[in-house]
Image (cartoon, rainbow, N blue to C red):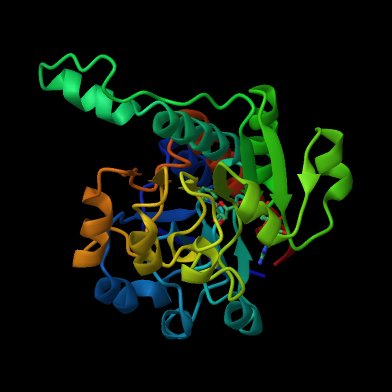
Amino acid sequence: MFVGRIKILIIDRVSEKFVKQLADKGFDIDYRPGINREELENIISNYNILVFRSRMKIDRDLIDKGHNLRILARYGIGLDNVDIDYAIKKGIAVVNAPNASTISVAELTLGLIIMIFRNLYNYIEHVKRGLWPKGKFIGRELYGKNLGIVGYGRIGSRVAHYGRALGMNVYVYDIRDVRNDVEKIGGKQVEFDELLEVSDVISLHVPLTPLTYHMINDNVLNKVRDGCVIVNTSRGEVIDTYALIKHLDRLGGVALDVLEQEPPRDEILFQLIHHPKVIVTPHIGAETVEAMDRIADELYNSIMEVIDWL
Ligand code: NAD
């Protein structure tokens, strides 16, 4: 049982609706988006619930300082910045909103694929500079091309549907047996190597785990087709940045919503970002009005469920 008023600290930007829902329940809420690590360490012991996004590492050190923590609430999906095992060992519940951003991330992925195939970023940039480069960057259609989906979960399966709707051939690699589901939409589950060899576009939708860390590396990139397009809206660490840069000349284009280092600081990241074949968005997969709204509801419900049985 919680004793006294529940105190909640929110350390990243969240929707007003979410804050209001919690405030309406009479909880004490401190909204400190952007708070730095040192400040957080100094005050975390005052709170029962910590709400955060992907910016802060919720590691052992921080968890140990949160003497009164009962719930870690990730405002979004990815839990790779949380030491979940340790939190659970300390009796702290970990909740997130795994379904809320699926549609938004899948739609962004499709947008990025089209952006690359039609060279839209080059055209847009030239026209903004007052030029009219008609015919300079001839694009390619998606129709009839092979779409390789790595990770056929919530987001990957939706991207696969979009690909099928556009007349693409869908190839899926997943550690789970998803053959039946994939075949239902007219796709094919294959081994990783086969996916690498056949795909015109490879779209990454795996969680970050020890198995998926640098899953796209030099060895793997050696196997992809010349002109293959790589799209990553999952987690930056799934791709080895150095290997990707090494293979850029052979690739058709790269679109990334996530980087190994966010925001980028190291020279290697800027080398990637400035390359003419690469487009980068600043981790905006879930940044839509609708996803934000759904995250607020899903996370609020999960927090309330945990509070009910604490
Ligand atoms: P999910 O858990 O529903 O699906 C992940 C799939 O990957 C599962 O089918 C799983 O079996 C498969 N998988 C796991 N390890 C694998 C491996 N080693 N090899 C092959 N397949 C493997 O996850 P989801 O909701 O679809 O999210 C996918 C990714 O998108 C995650 O990395 C998540 O963090 C990321 N994401 C990004 C944003 C963004 O803003 N860009 C927003 C939300 C989610």
Quarter where residue 279 is shown? top left
Q: Please count the marks in the image.
A: 0
Q: Nearer the viewer, residue 155 or 169?
A: 169
Rendering coords of residue 98 (x, y %): 63, 50
Could you tell me which residue is drawn at 59 percent across and 74 percent down? 84
Left or right, 161 with respect to 63, comes to: right
Quarter where residue 303 is shown? bottom right
Query: Where is 87 relative to 205, above or below?
Result: below
Question: In which quadrant will I find the N terminus?
Answer: bottom right
Query: Where is 52 relative to 182, above or below?
Result: below
Could you tell me which residue is drawn at 31 percent across and 44 percent down? 277
Question: In which quadrant will I find the C terminus?
Answer: bottom right
Rendering coords of residue 256 (x, y %): 40, 48
As drawn, the residue found furthest toward the left would be 130
Left or right, 1 with respect to 243, comes to: right
- Is residue 55 at least partly visible in the picture? no
Rendering coords of residue 219 (x, y %): 52, 70
Left or right, 56 with respect to 216, comes to: left
Q: Nearer the viewer, residue 144 or 47?
A: 144
- Is residue 179 at least partly visible in the picture? yes
**Can you tell me which quadrant of the image ligand 1 is in?**
bottom right
Could you tell me which residue is drawn at 52 percent across and 53 percent down? 234
Rendering coords of residue 198 (x, y %): 64, 47
